[in-house]
């Protein structure tokens, strides 16, 4: 049961960025509507005073400054990352993008190794298993609900996010 909740949780967490993006878009649209209303009021007031052309020039300048600032910030961030990675070995540069999948690989390999060792241990000691109840009891130890919950969460996160990205 816990593994089912964990898998479901992994699926939901993998969709969390899309949900947050949705709310961010709604907030952005609300903000843009408020800005448009303020700009319209300002343009009407300026037009009434005969300054419509000057208002348009000011708006264009403001947009240009905003676009330049955003472009400079993006370029600066990319340049910083490039400088840091330029000093690093090539394998480090390649590895940067694989950190999260590597953590997942380590977890899954550890899980498989522990379970394989426990199964091998039981295989080497046949006196431990006398009845089917012993098999069920040891399989519950080898494949515990906590392990399956963690594995379900990991798989749900990595493979569940594919469904959220489709449009």
Image: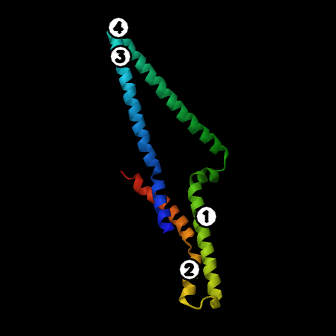
Q: Are marks 2 and 3 in contact (CB under 8 Å)?
A: no
Q: Nearer the viewer, mark 4 or mark 2?
A: 2
Which residue is under mark 2? 139
User: Can residue 155 be seen here?
Assistant: no
**Of the image marks 4 and 3, the number of the one nearer the N terminus:** 3
**Of the image marks 4 and 2, the number of the one nearer the N terminus:** 4
User: Can residue 58 be seen here?
Assistant: yes
User: Element at badge 1?
Assistant: helix
Please tell me in which quadrant of the rendered image residue 150 appears: bottom right
102 or 8: nearer the viewer? 8
Bin the neighbour count of mark 1 within 10 Å (Cα to Cα): few under 14, some 14-19, many 20 and up: few
Measured in 3D between alpha carbons, the distance from the residue under mark 4 to the one under mark 2, in whole angstroms, is 83 Å
Q: Are marks 4 and 3 in contact (CB under 8 Å)?
A: no
Bin the neighbour count of mark 3 within 10 Å (Cα to Cα): few under 14, some 14-19, many 20 and up: some
Q: Position of residue 45 (x, y in %)?
A: 35, 13
Measured in 3D between alpha carbons, the distance from the residue under mark 3 to the one under mark 1, in whole angstroms, is 60 Å
Bin the neighbour count of mark 4 within 10 Å (Cα to Cα): few under 14, some 14-19, many 20 and up: few
Which residue is under mark 1? 106
**Of the image marks 2 and 3, the number of the one nearer the N terminus:** 3
Please tell me in which quadrant of the rendered image residue 98 appears: bottom right
Which residue is under mark 4? 49
Q: Nearer the viewer, mark 4 or mark 1?
A: 4
**Of the image marks 1 and 2, the number of the one nearer the N terminus:** 1
User: Element at badge 2?
Assistant: helix
The dot on residue 43 is: 3
29 or 100: nearer the viewer? 29
**Of the image marks 4 and 1, the number of the one nearer the N terminus:** 4
């Amino acid at each position: 049961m816990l593994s089912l909740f964990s898998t479901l949780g992994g699926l939901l967490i993998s969709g969390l960025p899309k949900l947050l993006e949705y709310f961010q878009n709604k907030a952005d649209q609300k903000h843009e509507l408020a800005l448009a209303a303020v700009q319209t009021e300002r343009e009407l007031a300026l037009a009434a005073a005969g300054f419509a052309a000057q208002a348009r020039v000011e708006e264009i300048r403001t947009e240009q400054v905003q676009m330049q600032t955003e472009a400079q910030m993006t370029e600066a961030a990319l340049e910083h990352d490039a400088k840091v990675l330029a000093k690093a070995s090539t394998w480090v540069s390649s590895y940067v993008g694989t950190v999260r999948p590597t953590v997942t690989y380590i977890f899954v390999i550890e899980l498989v190794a522990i379970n394989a060792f426990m199964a091998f241990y039981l295989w080497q000691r046949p006196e431990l298993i006398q009845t089917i109840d012993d098999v069920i009891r040891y399989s519950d130890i080898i494949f515990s609900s906590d392990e399956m919950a963690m594995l379900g969460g990991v798989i749900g996160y990595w493979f569940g996010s594919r469904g959220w990205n489709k449009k």
